[in-house]
Image (cartoon, rainbow, N blue to C red):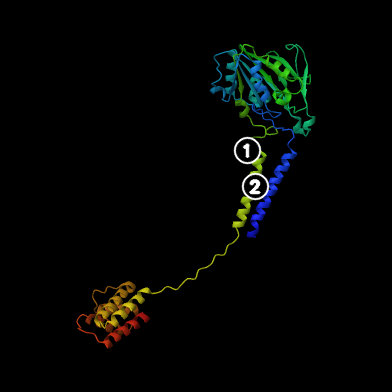
């Protein structure tokens, strides 16, 4: 199995790369239906055309992008006038503090233009209106047959020409609004109002419920760019600062091909086909590696040699050395020293006094014959007092020690 693993991995890599190339060719000309609302996106439902047209509609104004919440604005001020804030978002979801901040901004003589698919509950209460938003694709309607038709009312506009395109509708209309404080500006399908104006102090708030009319697809279809120009003509021409807002765009739950689907931290990378293919390949290789390493591997068991008593071999070697020199007395001292060291280490007895008490204690611990122990101790005690030790005496001493070691 192990020798075939490189071929299996190479085959999987080839299949994944082939699938990637083939699927890319097959879908190269398919319409990108992602609804991004991003000013940098040139895809059909991006906002590239709408954003870059602002400098032509307002040639005397500076165009700025805002990414901060209203309480932290640095590109806008609630103390000056002739400013316009444009908010394009799938869903407008401000909190109460942000709504009051926007209202103070408008009262100072500024304009807020909001185009969204739906207003949050707090926003509906604040603006005293109810919206009804829907998207036909949510009910299984084919996107290719889903169309959007909008128009502007006369007055205030000179005509009531309709504007449409064969793309996503993703719009809504106002079911209820205060007609005494609101001005009707536009409708969908010539019936339902989807565009109103609210006055506040010296400024105005525009609420528009068809955000995809700002998309590249809609604006570049037919003469629809005129719809965009006419809507923004409501913003005063003497506006000095136009701010494209992205705070409310990314505050709401993002869209990823369908409403209400939130984006994760890897959504941008996962949207790339090559990254997804590489990630799948990495996962497959990791699984194969784990399965390969899970196999039980039998290691060689080394042969363990029996422990050797090197100390005893050393003593025997030293003994042979002294025996060859015929130095029996010195050899006897070495044998006695080794014997006493053995007693101290193994039986934990003191060898300072080799008397009857020592002999009794050693006999009790070793169960050796008392006679043999007495002869060994007697010989050790007399080594220093003897001038010369005969070979027979040395041999007898050696034999008694060997008997002791064997049985003790």
Measured along the vertical axis of the image, is residue 307 above or below residue 35?
below
Q: x%, y% of residue 8?
A: 67, 54
Q: x%, y% of residue 303?
A: 49, 71
Q: Quadrant of the C terminus?
A: bottom left
- Whole-angstrom CA distance, mark 2 to mark 1, is 15 Å
Measured along the vertical axis of the image, is residue 241 above or below residue 273?
above
Closer to us: 357 or 246:
246
Q: Residue at x 37, y 74 (%)?
A: 310
- The residue indicated by pointer 1 is 269
- The residue indicated by pointer 2 is 281
Closer to us: 387 or 121:
387
Q: x%, y% of residue 160?
A: 77, 15
Q: In the drawing, does residue 338 fall left or right of residue 116?
A: left
Q: Residue furthest bottom?
A: 392
Report crowding for label 2: few under 14, some 14 to 19, many 20 or more residues within 10 A (C-alpha). Answer: some
Q: In the drawing, does residue 82 fall left or right of residue 319?
A: right
Q: Secondary structure at mark 1?
A: helix
Q: Which mark is residue 306?
A: none
Q: Residue at x 73, y 26 (%)?
A: 217
- Residue 279 sits in quarter: top right
């Amino acid at each position: 199995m192990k020798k075939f693993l490189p071929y299996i991995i190479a085959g999987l890599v080839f299949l994944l790369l082939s699938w990637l190339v083939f699927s890319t060719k097959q879908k190269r000309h398919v319409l990108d239906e992602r609804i991004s609302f991003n000013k940098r996106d040139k895809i059909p439902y991006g906002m590239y055309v709408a954003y870059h047209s602002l400098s032509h509609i307002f040639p005397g104004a500076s165009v700025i992008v805002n990414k901060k919440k209203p309480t932290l604005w640095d590109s806008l001020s609630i103390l000056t006038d002739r400013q316009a804030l444009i908010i394009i978002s799938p869903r407008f979801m401000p909190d109460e503090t942000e709504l009051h901040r926007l209202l103070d901004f408008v009262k100072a003589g500024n304009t807020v233009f909001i185009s969204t698919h739906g207003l949050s509950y707090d926003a509906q209460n604040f603006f005293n209106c109810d919206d009804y938003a829907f998207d036909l694709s949510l009910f299984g309607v084919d996107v290719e047959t889903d169309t959007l038709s909008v128009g502007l009312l006369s007055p205030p506009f000179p005509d009531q020409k309709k504007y449409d395109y064969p793309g996503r509708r993703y719009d809504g209309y106002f079911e209820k609004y205060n007609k005494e404080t609101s001005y009707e500006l536009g409708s969908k399908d010539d019936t339902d109002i989807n565009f109103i104006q609210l006055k506040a102090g010296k400024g105005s708030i525009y609420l528009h419920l068809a955000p995809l009319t700002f998309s590249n697809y809609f604006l570049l279809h037919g003469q629809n760019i005129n719809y965009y120009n006419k809507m923004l003509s409501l913003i005063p021409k003497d506006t000095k600062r136009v701010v494209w807002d992205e705070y409310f765009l990314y505050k709401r739950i993002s869209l990823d091909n369908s409403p209400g689907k939130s984006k994760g931290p890897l959504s941008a990378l996962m949207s790339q086909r090559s990254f997804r293919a590489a990630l799948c390949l990495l996962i497959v290789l990791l699984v194969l590696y784990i399965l390969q390493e899970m196999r039980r591997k039998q290691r060689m068991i080394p042969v363990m040699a029996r422990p050797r008593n090197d100390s005893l071999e050393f003593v025997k070697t030293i003994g042979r050395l002294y025996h060859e020199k015929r130095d029996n007395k010195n050899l006897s001292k070495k044998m006695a020293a080794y014997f006493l060291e053995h007693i101290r280490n193994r039986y934990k007895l003191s060898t300072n006094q080799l008397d009857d008490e020592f002999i009794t204690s050693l006999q009790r611990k070793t169960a050796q014959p008392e006679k043999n122990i007495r002869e060994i101790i007697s010989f050790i005690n007399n080594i220093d007092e003897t001038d010369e030790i005969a070979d027979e005496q040395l041999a007898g001493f050696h034999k008694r020690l060997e008997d002791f070691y064997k049985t003790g």
